[in-house]
Amino acid sequence: MREAALSTETEQHLLTVAEVAAVMRVSTMTVYRLIRAGELLATRVGRSYRIWEDDVRSYLQRGRA
């Protein structure tokens, strides 16, 4: 299994909830809570969520302020 890491390339990727949790070093439940609270934007794909890398990066940047 590959390590989840944010890409520094210009091309964006959709990340799974588990990949976002690994990047943020939190549980998947925390990521679901952030999505439901509207703090982290996510796209619904079937019954699961996908999160754009830039949205994760933006969320993390807001935490630094």
Image: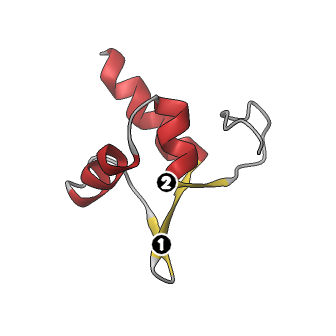
Q: Is residue 40 left or right of residue 7?
A: left
Q: Nearer the viewer, residue 54 or 26?
A: 26
Residue 47 image position (x, y, % from top left): 45, 80
Q: Is residue 3 left or right of residue 26?
A: right
**How many marks do you count on the picture?**
2
Q: Quadrant of the C terminus?
A: top left
Identify the secondary structure beneath mark 2.
helix
Crowd rating for badge 2 (residues with CA inside 10 Å; few <14, some 14–19, many 20+): many
Q: Which residue is mark 2?
A: 17
Q: Is residue 16 left or right of residue 24?
A: right
As drawn, the residue found furthest toward the bottom would be 46
The residue type indicated by label 2 comes to: Val
Residue 41 image position (x, y, % from top left): 39, 55
Q: Which residue is mark 1?
A: 48
Q: Earlier in the sequence, mark 2 or mark 1?
A: 2
Residue 62 image position (x, y, % from top left): 34, 27
Whether the residues at callouts 2 and 1 have beta carbons within 8 Å, the answer is yes
As drawn, the residue found furthest toward the top would be 65
* Label 2 – label 1 distance at C-alpha: 8 Å
Q: Is residue 10 above or below residue 45?
A: above
Residue 13 image position (x, y, % from top left): 69, 53
